[in-house]
Amino acid sequence: MLKYILLLVLFTFTLYAKTIQFSEEKYFESLEMTFYKKGKITFLKDKIEVIYENDNTVLTYSNNLLIKQKGLDKIEVDLRTKPAIKMFFVLFEAIYFDKKKILQAYFTAKTDKGVTTLRPNKNIAAYIHSVHYKKQNKYLEFLKIHMRNNDRILIEETY
Amino acid sequence: MKKPIRYLNFFLFVISLAVLVALQSYTHFSTSLFSVLPQSDAKKMIEGFQKTQNSQTLLVSVKGFDESALERIQQIEIKLDSLESVSLKVKARNHVLAAHHNANKLMIQDVNVTKLTTIDVAKTLKSLYHEMTSSFFPVIIDKIDPFKVLISKTPIEIHSKNGHAIFGDYGYISYFTLETKSLKDHKKVYSEIHNTLRDAKKVQFFSPLFYYVENSEAIRSDVQNIMALAFIVLLLLYIVILKDVLLLTHTVITLATSAMLATVVLSQMYEQISIFVFVFGVSISTVAIDYMFHHYLHGYYRQEDGKEQSEKMKFNREVLFGFLTTFFAFFILSFTSFLLIKQIAFFAMVSLFISYIHFAFLYPKIGFKTFIFTEKKNKKVTCSISSNIFLSISLVLILASSMWVHFDFNLKNLDYDNQTLKKTEHFFESKHTSHKNVPFSIKADTIDDLITKSKILQREIPTTRVSLASLMSSISYENNKELFAQRHPLKLALQKEAHKLGFKKGYFEDAYTAEKPFTTYTKEQIKSYGIEILKLNDDFITFGIVHEAHYKEVLAYDFVKSLSIKEHFELLMQESVKDIGILGILVIVMIFIMFFILAGNKFVYATIFLLFPIALISVYAYFFSINLLHLFMLFIILAIAIDYAIYMVTDSNIRTKKAISYSLVSTFSGFGVLVFSQINALFSLGIIAIIGIGAISVLLLCMKEV
């Protein structure tokens, strides 16, 4: 019996779990420099995990909590008081899983030639200037985020 | 041919009605208890606060956290937002304020001096650089305060899911602002909201504004029923017992004239008059019927065609003394600071005066058919108890009652008990933390002082939020200017290390530079920042909120004032109790003086009419707490009882007793019927009236005359 329960639990987890590889390009206006990285993102039920290549830090986002774990060191950040960080994860998840109603809560969307442009509503506009993304079926071709301080982030899903 | 004076009563009625309509005096009535708060700075402050968005909010919650629930709440938001007086509340930043604050924050915010003086510039900047370049999510560096030496208030926790605010474990929640001013607007928006959400499933919604609409409707309907009932009792009395329709018509017209003129007089004195004043005032007017009964049953209205009435029959001394006693009782009570009672007292004085003039001087001129008086000789009095026994029982009960009498000053307990709405309100309160925030106001002589005081509160009491604290005060400006001038090397070190790490040139140019000029704010400028500020006489007022756990700490500051209507009312009521107590003693002293003059050796007998109703009411007080309206009704009962005592000691006969009995029936129709009211304020008046009427009836039936 226990065996079946374990199998069911594993099945349930794998049903929600999805891992994608990504490449990241970040331009920092303060440094006038661009940084490149690669990593993988795992979407679990109510949870997102991010791990960069050549870095043993695991970043876990779960609703109102952000956990940064490096070896035994663990830092927890309450995102209820950090809406800008929370916004980033909500945006990422909503775009990847096509949660249009969630995007609608923060942005006004417009799609042209397959590229969707998101214009932030009043409060988000203090941090984010605009968002552009393109998805082909379930594949995220690119996600560009233009920050209000002129920083830019480009994320592309890789095979 | 009939004498023209017979029509004078109708003529006065028409004139009164014309004046009432011409001056639109009836438009001064208000169903809100707020109208009985006296004009004061506190009232103006609350009015000012109510005009801000905080006081009229609509909460709508949809059950569940799935996408279908999210879609439903978004649709509701669109529908409600499209209504004229409803707008979705978005916690939008005021960009003018944000820009001003960002440019001047070094001169505005408190500084962590320890951090400022001990910071390792190279190490901290390197760590910042690392966090920025290695983090998955964007890290925004503050160019003005990269090391976060400025103390920021902990941001308000935002409870959200899927990009939407959530409501405990119930579901999504949305907030709306209701922009309505009058009761008419309230009703319109109430009906629009209910129509919009009528078919919505798994939706809960609440606004404090619903109380205005539902309670005023309930009060209006209750008052109408009570007045109809009172009128039926009066009709029965006149048609069945007196069998004189003409007298009934004249009496009703007289009472209507007196009520209308009292309304006209009061509307010239006050901008707003509580509907309770009208209801109670009309009830008091019916007390004047006892003047009519006494005259009528003693033959003062007898028609004696072609003959002049004898001199003796033209004027009744007992009724005059009864009227004067009641009139002066109200006159003394009119000195109270509690506006509701003051207005009722004025209303009563005017209406009783007009009624007395009618019943004492006009009715004998008009003349009515004589009341056929049949004395039943065989009828025996069922009991005959000595006045000393009544006196002893009364004194024992009154003295003992000091052990159990307790007062209830909770204003809500006087209002209509809207259980359904209270249940919905409780549902929102139980799950919503922001409901636990209590608003308050801050008062200061100057805008600068107001900002300083706002900052003090924010600094000292952790859960306090005052928008004005986000501005610059002369104290914060001078302190910070000196601090950053002393720490000029910090800026130099920052620029040097930033250059080493690769930050572009001039990126930290504005960091820790306290060279901005001082900003002298004007009221208009502050309003443009979206911050509420009022000028009240010579003071400036702003508003803040604090968690209920810290509310008392905030109120302890002498510059902080409560914004709770309930608290102001209760305070006023508590003050009024002392006030009414003193006035009540004066009324009693006046009554005793009247007894000494009129009753002579029957003084004790007369006094029992005063003491016995109090004694029975003190028994009631054993079971229930006494509120202000109980006390007020007690004084009215005493004033009426005094009339009867005067009649009994000066002219005791079967006619007087009969006149008093009819009077009691009419008093029941005026006050006693209030016992059927759903509104506790009116019920309180009714129950005391019933006990009082009962006590006097017992005295009439059972007390042995002296």
Image (cartoon, rainbow, N blue to C red):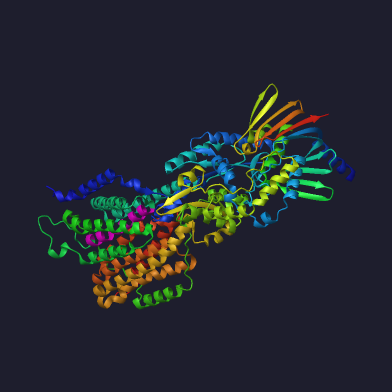
Q: In which quarter of the image is residue B554?
A: bottom right
Q: Vertical placement of A77 versus B609: above or below?
A: above
Query: Does the magenta-highlighted stretch encompass residue A48?
Result: no
Q: Nearer the viewer, residue B137 or A49?
A: B137
B12 displayed left or right of B1: right
Q: Is residue B179 visible?
A: yes
Q: Nearer the viewer, residue B121 or B633?
A: B121
Q: Nearer the viewer, residue B467 or B106?
A: B106
Outermost left residue: B306
Residue B551 x %, y %: 56, 58
Quadrant placement of the C terminus of chain B = bottom left
Identify the magenta region: B276-296
Residue B9 x %, y %: 21, 50
Residue B657 x %, y %: 28, 66
B36 displayed left or right of A80: left
Q: Which residue is drawn at 88% across and 42% down?
A: A4
Q: Vertical placement of A16 versus B660: above or below?
A: above
Residue B79 x %, y %: 55, 34
